[in-house]
Amino acid sequence: MHRNAVVSREEWFEAHRKHLEREKELTKFRELIAAERRQLPWFKLRKDYVFESEAGPKHLAELFAGKSQLIVYHFMMAPGSDHRCEGCSFLADHIDGADQHLKHHDVSLVVVSRAPLAEVLPYKQRMGWKFDWVSSYASDFNFDLQVSFTDRQIAAGETTYNFEKRPLRSKDLPGTSIFYRNECGDIFLTFMSRARGGDALIGTYHYLDMTPKGRGETGPYHNLMDWVRLHDEYRDKDKDRSDCCA
């Protein structure tokens, strides 16, 4: 590990005081982006979608659960696949804590996957998650929201993800979609976040970003795949503390 300069208390205080100005700039810029996000145009959905839930079939409007705002997290789980996405699971580990508060702020949060519910629920139980998780297996929801892609689209290179048309190999990708339902029952797509946009929902990253070693994503993938595991599959080992004094 790189050793930073060790200075007097006065020098330490002054360096951190100056850096705080940059932190404040970031906070204000984040607030500005959030305000601009709330002013973006909406798209009115003309199509209804039905999902498989633990309570039986549910229309998209029912996922709002009496709230006017709905957050959908698109969890990568394809029908028949035995792969369990570490990245989606990492993010999902942070949902239940937030959901305790969101439901009291006119927001419903639901996780959606293409896999049938019979494949989803055993994994949900294994992970100990409490959030609502439904299947879009029988609808075009994932495809219309551009987080799932047909074989034809992939073969033709006609795949659009994160507002960019580019060739993809994966049939399913993660993302977050935000909806609003008005008093007349009209449903609008108000915002979509894809790719690294999900970082903002991962509290562990914000903790790590304050530590000396940071996220530690140094290879071979240079992303969360370097270290993130399903939370019941970590195998911690004692690490060499070569930075310590003898």
Image: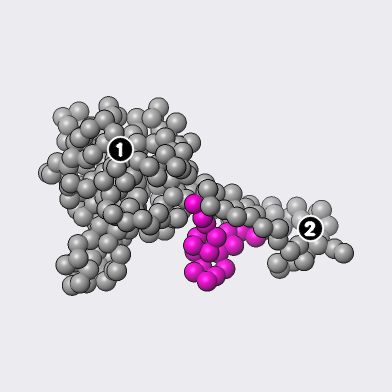
Number of numbered labels in the structure image:
2
Q: Secondary structure at mark 1?
A: strand
In the depicted structure, whether residue 102 falls above or below residue 200 = above
* Coloring basis for residues: one colour
Across and down, in percent, residue 227 comes to: 55, 60
Q: Is residue 96 visible?
A: yes
The amino acid on which the numbered mark 2 sits, given as a three-letter code, is Glu
Q: Identify the residue at image location x=44%, y=42%.
A: 126
Residue 143 bears which disc, if any? none
Cα separation, mark 1 vs mark 2, equals 48 Å
Across and down, in percent, residue 215 comes to: 57, 59
Q: Identify the residue at image location x=85%, y=63%.
A: 245
Q: Secondary structure at mark 2?
A: helix
> Which residue sits furthest right?
246
Q: Is residue 1 located in the magenta-colored stretch of the structure?
A: no
Query: Badge 2 is on which residue?
Result: 11
Q: Nearer the viewer, residue 91 or 189?
A: 91
In the depicted structure, whether residue 217 falls above or below residue 96 = below
Query: Badge 1 is on which residue?
Result: 70
Q: Identify the residue at image location x=74%, y=66%.
A: 3
Q: Which residues are magenta?
A: 213-230
